[in-house]
Amino acid sequence: MKHIGQPYDDLRAWLRHLTQTGRLAVIREGVGLRHELAAIAKRLDGDKATYFPRPDGHEMPVISGFMSQRGWIAEAMGVADADVLSAFRRAAQSPLPWREVEPGAASCQQVVHTDIDMHALLPIPTHSEHDNGPYITAGMVIARNPVTGVQNVSINRIQVHGKDRMALLMLPRHLYAFFKEAQAQGVALPVAIVIGADPLTLLASQAITPIDHDELEIAGALHGKPLPVVKCLSNEVRVPANAEIVIEGRILPDEMDLEGPFGEFPKYYSAQEKREVIMVDRVTHRRSPVYHTIIPAEYEHLLLGSIPREATLLAHLQRSFPNVLDVHLSMGGVGRYHLYVKIRKMHEGQPKNVILCAFGAHYDIKHVVVVDEDVDVHQPRQVEWALATRFQADVDLVVISGAQGSVLDPSTTTRFSLEDQVGMPESHEQGISAKMGMDATRPVRYHEHVFTKVRIPGEDTLDLEQFVVPGATVDWQAD
């Protein structure tokens, strides 16, 4: 793996770079926080990051979309596009312990607020049409295991209900396990919500790791040096010292508030349900901070989740199948549900084994397509071409019924009758899904060139600048 640049370990340096390379759009002052800001950011998503000065007259500007292309993420990591997964995988396997700094040296604590009014302090947008109010969407929630003290980092959607009270969605993962342990002890779980981290720390927060593996140490490995952290002022949680904003608080052990509906990553709304409550104790931030919001279900949201998952899935598959060459969670599959796997096929039954292994790797995966090494899994048209010419449903299709899938996939609820069901199904019945695998590989042996992909020598290597005459035109006037 070749590094082609230095990794970006500072958000403002990355935003400066995007500005200098024409990839940041500055929006007029005063854009509305309710829907208007999100609508503009969505229109520019994947093209330019967006900077909103004085949204709704708020002193604090908002930034969105600064990680909305795969190539931008590679650039922030300082590697070529093709090396993104290997670089992330290396960092996840070789984390660097963070470096603690004194509170006075931490820019995230330059300004401290103890009189809390979240709506007045932060420009929190309302994103989608039916969202039940303003949501923090780019907040990294950091908590310590009450037993071991090891931290976990995750991004959770957080609805801001009042001046100092918020509700969050916790899926049954590490943060939820920490909360249940604290709840069993009858105490609140101290947390910090970090908004405005550097791009690689944000990416590291989405790593899929065993419990008691601190994602801030993966961030340090991505940076190539230990991440500077600082202890919160009201609890023992350590946060990135150079973050823009830190919300310090506690997840209460015995209180619930209604949360949702909210437009989630599958591009549908999740239902309104009772969720756990965060009580905010204080807010700290840099002088002249920038607030980051992620537009739900758009490129920044999907890529930040899909790339760490791809790295984990590739490592998982290669442990059993060293001839797996690449994987891709497609954007059409919302970066979670559709997995494309490239293999160097050695045996006729192998693609089906790979399919089954992929389903076991993560319950979100719903459809798997296995293709040959001459297919680029990052190009959906090439995957579709392989399906069109190398797949026969009666022999190449794998279907599994009644498996665990994503609770946010609305199609998993269709087996419940509205007449028979009051409210949502019980948690143990949610997300029941069928899985489908497609072997779109050619036979190991075939006659002559029947399955050889057509190509023209030189089509992908010649230098067009040597052949195209710049500025030349043709006179099409008839004699």
Image (spheres, rainbow, N blue to C red):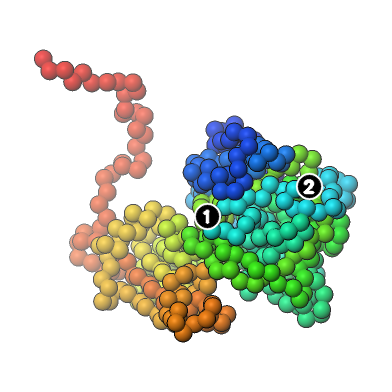
Q: CA distance from mark 1 to mark 2?
A: 30 Å
The image quadrant that residue 417 belongs to is: bottom left
Whether residue 230 is visible, yes or no, is no
Whether residue 454 is visible, yes or no, is yes
> Mark 1 belongs to which amino acid?
Glu
Name the residue: 67% across, 53% down.
201
Vertical placement of residue 29 versus 138, above or below = above
Name the residue: 77% across, 74% down.
253
> Mark 2 belongs to which amino acid?
His
In this picture, residue 301 sits left or right of residue 365: right
Image quarter where the C terminus lies is top left
Work out which residue is located at the far front of the displayed protein and give it: 419
Residue occupied by mark 2: 285
In the image shown, does 89 or 242 lie closer to the viewer? Answer: 242
Name the residue: 54% across, 54% down.
128
Q: Earlier in the sequence, mark 1 or mark 2?
A: 1
Work out which residue is located at the far left of the displayed protein and give it: 479
Q: Secondary structure at mark 2?
A: strand
In the image shown, does 214 or 232 lie closer to the viewer? Answer: 232
The image quadrant that residue 477 belongs to is: top left
Q: Are marks 1 and 2 in contact (CB under 8 Å)?
A: no
In this picture, residue 193 sits left or right of residue 172: right
Which of discs 1 and 2 lies nearer the camera? The answer is: 1
Residue 478 lies, in percent from the top left, at: 12, 18
In this picture, residue 248 sits left or right of residue 58: right
Q: Secondary structure at mark 1?
A: loop
Vertical placement of residue 416 versus 313, above or below = below
Residue 309 lies, in percent from the top left, at: 55, 63
Residue occupied by mark 1: 129
Vertical placement of residue 43 versus 279, above or below = above
